[in-house]
Each structure stands twice: as structure tokens, then as C-alpha cells.
Image: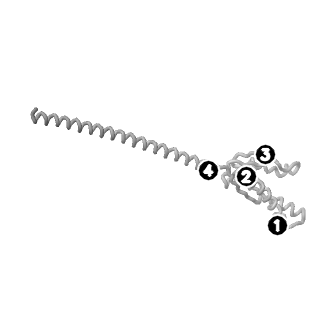
């Protein structure tokens, strides 16, 4: 064989080796690209899942039940008790405040034991009006109120607090017997 033929064979072998190396390099590049895309997709999916969890946690925290207990010292009752007892309005009002605070503390303990966020408020004035005002100020979703109220002729004259709360409330009212 001549040198030219040997050179041609070597050139073809060299070309085949180069082609094989290029094919192997392409296969490696393709595999690396696929692996990179898979990693990127997994990272994106993980980040999306974590973001969804953060959003869900934030919504759950935002929607966590918060209860505001309110006790209204009825100023007309303070006046009536002061007149009837001959007492001092400040003392009568103080006694009604202490009574209200005891009720609020008891309710707050019950709610706290149920892992609820609690707020206590004592207000002064007409109970239905103060409850309505507080509901508007606090953007309340629901008012829960007892049915207990005045009976007989006095109820006709002044109306029940529950009925007036129902009438004026800016949100639904749940009445508890």
C-alpha cells in the first residue's frame, strides 16, 4: 500500500473518531440539558408548592377567629340605680364596670382555652347603639347575642336590646337562648 492510501485510511479513521467524539459530546450535552431542565422543573415545582403553602398559611392566619367580647354599661340603668338607691353615680357605674369585667374575664378564659384570639371591651351608653358602633368600627362578621332581656310592660316601652341590635346591626346576628 502506498503512503497516499495509508494517509487516506488514517484520515477516514480520524474523521470517524472525530464524528464519534462529536456524537458522544452531543449525547452528553443533550443528557446534561435534559438533567438541567429536570432540575429546573423540580426546583420550580418545589418553589411553587412552597409559595402555595405560604399563601395558605397567610390566609389561615388572616382568617383565624378573633372574638371581641363587649359589655355595655347602660347609662340609663346607672341613672335609675343612682336615683333609686340614693347612691353616687360614680359608685354605681364602678360596680357595673366590675361586674362587666368579671363576665368578660370569664368569657375570655373560655375563648383562650379554645385557642381563639380575644379582645375585651367595656363601653358606655345605649347597649344596642354601642354594639352597632363597635361592629362597624371592628368590621365584625357576626354578632352573637343572648335572648335575655326585659319582660312585661317595660319591654314594650324601651324595646329589647336584642331586637334593636338585629334591627341596626351591620352584619348577621346570631341569637343564643
The residue drawn where x is 83% and y is 59% is 77
- 23 or 99: nearer the viewer: 23
Give how far across and how far down residue 18 sits, in percent. Answer: 23, 39
Report the Cα–Cα distance between label 2 and label 1: 34 Å
Upstream in sequence: badge 3 or badge 4: 4
Q: Nearer the viewer, mark 1 or mark 4?
A: 4
- The residue singled out by tag 3 in the image is 176
- 2 or 21: nearer the viewer: 2
As helix, strand or loop, the secondary structure at mark 1 comes to helix
Q: How is the image coloured?
A: one colour
Quadrant location of the N terminus in the rendered image: top left
* Labelled disc at residue 90: 1
Upstream in sequence: badge 2 or badge 1: 1
The residue drawn where x is 27% and y is 39% is 22
The quadrant holding residue 92 is: bottom right
Q: Nearer the viewer, mark 3 or mark 1?
A: 3
The residue drawn where x is 82% and y is 59% is 99
Mark 1 crowdedness (10 Å alpha carbons): few <14, some 14-19, many ≥20 = few
- The residue singled out by tag 2 in the image is 113
- The residue singled out by tag 4 in the image is 61
Upstream in sequence: badge 1 or badge 4: 4
* Labelled disc at residue 123: none
Upstream in sequence: badge 2 or badge 4: 4
Q: Is residue 170 above or below residue 79?
A: above
Q: Outermost residue toward the right?
A: 85
Report the Cα–Cα distance between label 3 and label 4: 27 Å
As helix, strand or loop, the secondary structure at mark 4 comes to helix
Report the Cα–Cα distance between label 3 and label 2: 21 Å
Report the Cα–Cα distance between label 3 and label 1: 32 Å
Q: Outermost residue toward the front?
A: 1
Amino acid at each position: 500500500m502506498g503512503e497516499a492510501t495509508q494517509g487516506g485510511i488514517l484520515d477516514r479513521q480520524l474523521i470517524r473518531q472525530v464524528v464519534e467524539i462529536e456524537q458522544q459530546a452531543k449525547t452528553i450535552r443533550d443528557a446534561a440539558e435534559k438533567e438541567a431542565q429536570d432540575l429546573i422543573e423540580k426546583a420550580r415545582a418545589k418553589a411553587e408548592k412552597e409559595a402555595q403553602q405560604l399563601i395558605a398559611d397567610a390566609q389561615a392566619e388572616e382568617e383565624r377567629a378573633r372574638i371581641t367580647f363587649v359589655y355595655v354599661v347602660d347609662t340609663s340603668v346607672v341613672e335609675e340605680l343612682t336615683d333609686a338607691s340614693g347612691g353616687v353615680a360614680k359608685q354605681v357605674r364602678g360596680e357595673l364596670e366590675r361586674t362587666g369585667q368579671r363576665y368578660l374575664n370569664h368569657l375570655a378564659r373560655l375563648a383562650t382555652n379554645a385557642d381563639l384570639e380575644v379582645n375585651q371591651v367595656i363601653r358606655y351608653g345605649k347597649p344596642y347603639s354601642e354594639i352597632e358602633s363597635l361592629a362597624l368600627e371592628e368590621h365584625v362578621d357576626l354578632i352573637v347575642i343572648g335572648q335575655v332581656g326585659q319582660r312585661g310592660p317595660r319591654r314594650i316601652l324601651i324595646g329589647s336590646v336584642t331586637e334593636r341590635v338585629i334591627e341596626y346591626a351591620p352584619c348577621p346576628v346570631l341569637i343564643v337562648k
